Image (cartoon, grey):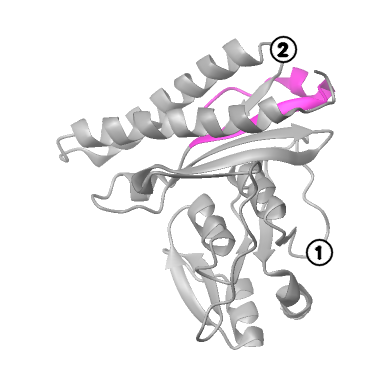
Amino acid sequence: MTGTTSSDDHALAAEVAADAGRLLVAIRAAHDGRDPKRLRDEGDHRAHERILELLAVARPYDPVLSEEGLDDDRRLGAERVWVVDPLDGTREYAEAGRTDWAVHVALVVDGVAAIGAVALPAEGVVLATRPAPPAPPTRAGPLRVVTSRTRHPSESVAVAEALGAEVVALGSAGAKAMAVVRGQVDAYVHAGGMYQWDSAAPVAVAAAAGLHVSRIDGSPLVYNQPEAYLPDLLVCRTELAGTCLAALADA
């Protein structure tokens, strides 16, 4: 299956993300709440192991790049590489009642995030590239730009001002990108501190839904590069892309 994809890959991405998500929900439910760091570490480790096990059985010849695993340079010569984040949003995962954490499973083919699934396990939701999510409906009220809970990057502020939009805070990158896919917000801007596994699956799903996805300078997002760092991202409604990119260029 080198360099090619199939409908089975779409289904596999969704199944693996959902399975890891169910495991994370069970781990969270069994936790006594007294040691958030232990919960975060256990969730990260066990979800990573589950994803590797499932992919090893289903796609034994495909390399995997995971946030929680050691990098293997052999992936650089492969046309197909799975890029996964077993638990995106560990802070939110360890906070009782929060739903803005995710599991990312993407298949990168020749540098493109071609297939992916993002599970939002606390909501029992999986969004995937097939069947692709419908284009998000137009919401009533002001536009909304989603940004980090812990900081408001100047780039997000610039886009919000250009759009005359409200700023909404959410946790994980996957939750923020899926908020655009689901029509809950209109744009997501991130600059700094992001890696390939943070954006590959969300970008695949957002692109399948017909949204604009790019780096903040408008260039394509290219995956399976030697450097795992891929620091910036724009996901937005297509009709807003020109305004967003102009604001980012000025910023």
Res. 197 mark = none
Res. 218 mark = 1
Q: Which of pointers 2 and 1 indicates the residue nearer the eye?
A: 2
Indicate left or right for 93 with 217 as reference.
left
Picture quadrant of residue 30: top left
Give the residue type at disc 1: Gly
For image coordinates 71% across by 30% down, the residue present is: 7
Q: Position of residue 17 (x, y in %)?
A: 50, 33
**Crowd band around label 2 with a 10 angstrom C-alpha radius: few (<14), some (14–19), many (20+):** some
Q: Quadrant of the C terminus?
A: bottom right
Looking at the picture, tell me which residue is in the foreground, 50 or 45: 50
Q: Quadrant of the N terminus?
A: top right
Q: Position of residue 89 (x, y in %)?
A: 43, 47
Q: Is residue 73 magenta?
A: yes
State the separation of the CA atoms marked 2 and 1. Answer: 33 Å
Q: Is there a contact, CB below 8 Å, between mark 2 and mark 1? A: no
Taking the image as drawn, is residue 226 in sight?
Answer: no
Taking the image as drawn, is residue 210 in sight?
Answer: yes
| Number of numbered discs on residues | 2
For image coordinates 75% across by 80% down, the residue present is: 243
Q: Secondary structure at mark 1?
A: loop
For image coordinates 64% across by 72% down, the residue present is: 155
Q: Position of residue 198 (x, y in %)?
A: 59, 45
For image coordinates 52% across by 29% down, the residue present is: 15
Picture quadrant of residue 104: top right
Res. 61 mark = 2
In the rendered view, would you say 73 is above or below 178? above
In the rendered view, would you say 142 is above or below 151? below
Q: Which residues are magenta?
A: 67-86
Q: Is residue 145 magenta?
A: no
